[in-house]
């Protein structure tokens, strides 16, 4: 039985390179990706937090540069309620919608990323507001890496 597993493993290893898989970012110079402007829309606090955490260099005067438009949306829905009908847990959702335009203002790609988190709701409004703000920032922090990769992947796939 062990020999059969070894033979199957060896055959699979031999067949993987023949499937045509090539990494998307293997021979790509990320310095060639030039973004002239990133426009943010949505709630000011979330847009500011995203702007300060998104590490994409901007080259204002560059040929063949891209424009990125990012829209942030937030929402909260009741998840659980107590016997009196009062919400005890909410699900906070942050959605980031991104559109990339080339130098001729032609849409070359769009992507939507979303993250959510469940939080407890108490009778203390100020504590609840602070907890929700922190969780929204945590969601955005988690989505920043996905957003950066999505922007680069859309631009690279457009170049090929």
Image (tube, grey):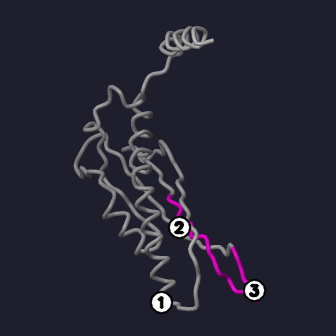
Q: Position of residue 141 (x, y in %)?
A: 40, 60
Pointer 2: what residue? 73
Q: Secondary structure at mark 2?
A: strand
Q: Would residue 95 be counted in the magenta stretch? A: yes
Q: Is residue 13 above or below residue 130?
A: above
Q: Position of residue 52 (x, y in %)?
A: 31, 64
Q: Would residue 16 be counted in the magenta stretch? A: no
Q: 24 or 82: which is nearer to us? A: 82
Q: Which numbered tag is attached to residue 126?
A: 1
User: Which label's residue is closer to the chain start, 3 or 1?
Assistant: 3
Q: Quadrant of residue 63?
A: top left
User: Which label's residue is closer to the chain start, 1 or 2?
Assistant: 2
Q: How far apart in space, not on screen, are marks 1 and 2 (Cα)?
A: 22 Å
User: Which label's residue is closer to the chain start, 2 or 3?
Assistant: 2
Specify the principal SS of the magenta part.
Answer: strand
Which stretch appears magenta? 80-96
Q: Position of residue 147 (x, y in %)?
A: 43, 51
Give me the residue at 41% from left, 44% from top.
Answer: 149
Q: How far apart in space, not on screen, are marks 3 and 1 (Cα)?
A: 21 Å
Q: Which numbered tag is attached to residue 85?
A: 3
Q: Quadrant of residue 49?
A: bottom left
Give me the residue at 44% from left, 67% from top.
Answer: 41
Q: Secondary structure at mark 1?
A: helix
Give me the residue at 45% from left, 76% from top.
Answer: 133
Q: How far apart in space, not on screen, are marks 2 and 3 (Cα)?
A: 27 Å
Q: Are marks 1 and 2 in contact (CB under 8 Å)?
A: no
Q: Position of residue 51 (x, y in %)?
A: 34, 63
Q: Are marks 3 and 1 in contact (CB under 8 Å)?
A: no
Q: Which numbered tag is attached to residue 6?
A: none
Q: Secondary structure at mark 3?
A: loop
């Amino acid at each position: 039985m062990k020999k059969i597993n070894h033979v199957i493993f060896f055959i699979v290893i031999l067949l993987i390179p023949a499937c045509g898989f090539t990494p998307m970012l293997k021979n790509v110079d990320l310095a060639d990706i030039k973004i002239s402007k990133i426009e943010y829309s949505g709630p000011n606090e979330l847009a500011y937090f995203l702007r300060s955490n998104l590490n994409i260099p901007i080259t204002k005067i560059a040929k063949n540069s891209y424009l990125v438009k990012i829209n942030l949306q937030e929402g909260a829905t009741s998840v659980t309620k107590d016997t009196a009908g009062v919400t005890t847990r909410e699900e906070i959702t942050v959605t980031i919608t991104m559109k990339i335009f080339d130098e001729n203002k032609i849409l070359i790609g769009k992507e939507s990323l979303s993250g959510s988190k469940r939080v407890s709701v108490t009778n203390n409004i100020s504590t609840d507001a602070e907890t929700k703000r922190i969780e929204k920032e945590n969601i955005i922090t988690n989505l920043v890496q996905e957003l950066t990769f999505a922007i680069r992947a859309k631009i690279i796939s457009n170049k090929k």
